[in-house]
Image (cartoon, rainbow, N blue to C red):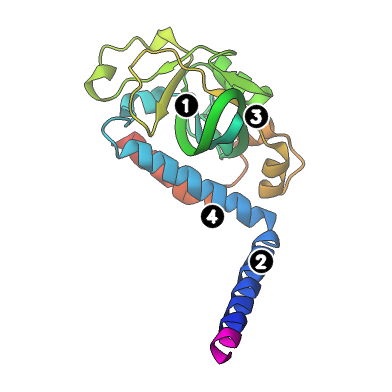
Amino acid sequence: MMKNSLRFIALTFGVLAISSASLTAAKQPYTEKLAGRLTTAEWVLETIMVDARSTIPRNLLRQAKGIIILNQYRAGFIFGGQGGNGVLIIRNPQTGKWGVPGFMTAGQASFGLQVGYTEVNNIYLLMTDEAVSKAYSGRFDIGVDAKAVAGPVGKNAENFDLFRAEVLAYTASSGLFAGATVKGGWVSVDDKANRAFYNTTYSSPEILLSTWFRLPPPAQPLMARMSAYEAE
C-alpha cells in the first residue's frame, strides 16, 4: 500500500512537472522563440558546411545574392505534409554586404501512403536578382518560380555553369547530383515575425534590404559563421 501511494505521488509530481514545463514554453516571449529559430539556422548552416558531401563551395557562397536556410519536417499518415521555418538573408546590392536575417515559413503538401517523421535541412543559394525579388515578394515556389538545381560540391564547382539556374540547392542528406533539377516546395517571408523581432512597422523587403537596421545580438552568431565560411 505504501509503495503504491509513493508511486502515485511520484507520478502526480511528474505530470505536474511536465505540465509546468509546457506552460512555461507556451509563455516564452515571442522574440525568444524567434531567437531560437536563428540558432537553428546556424546549426543547419554548420551541418551542411562540415559535411564533405554537401559543403557549399566558398566561391559560390561569395557570388550568391541571397541565401535561404531552412529547417523542415515531413510527417503524416496517408496524407502527408511538410512544414518548417527558416531565414532569408540578402546581399545588399549597394554595399555588397549581407543584410540582417529575415524569418520565413515553409511548407509543401503531399499525398500518398507515408508514415513517420523526417527532418530535412536545406540551404538555397539565390544566384540572381530575380530569384531574390521573388523570395521576398510573397510566396515563392522553389523550382517552379525559379529554376533550381542541386549545387556542386568540392572540385565539381570549378567547371559548373553558374548561369544554368537561378537557385542552387544543398541538403544535409546525400544523394543529389550536381545539376539535377530540384523542387523544394514553397517559402514565404514571415512579416509578423520580422516586425516583432526588429520592433518596427517596416515590411520585410524594407528590413532585409536596409542598411540602417543593427544586427541584434541573437543574430550575430549566425552572421559571424556566414562571414567565416565566406572568407575561408
Comes first in the chain, label 2 or label 3: 2
**Camera-side residue: 110 or 83?**
110
Q: Find disc 1 in the rendering and name its residue.
A: 124
Comes first in the chain, label 3 or label 4: 3
Q: Which residues are magenta?
A: 1-6
Foreground tag (2 vs 3): 2
Answer above or below: position of 223 versus 33.
above
Q: Residue at x 54, y 55 (%)?
A: 217
Task: Give the CA separation, mark 3 to mark 1.
Answer: 14 Å
Q: Residue 199, which numbered label?
A: none
Q: Residue at x 33, y 37 (%)?
A: 49
Determine whether, in the image, residue 48 is placed left or right of residue 70.
left
Task: Give the CA separation, mark 4 to mark 1.
Answer: 24 Å
Determine whether, in the image, residue 52 is placed left or right of residue 32.
left
Q: Find disc 2 in the rendering and name its residue.
A: 24
Q: Find disc 3 in the rendering and name its residue.
A: 188
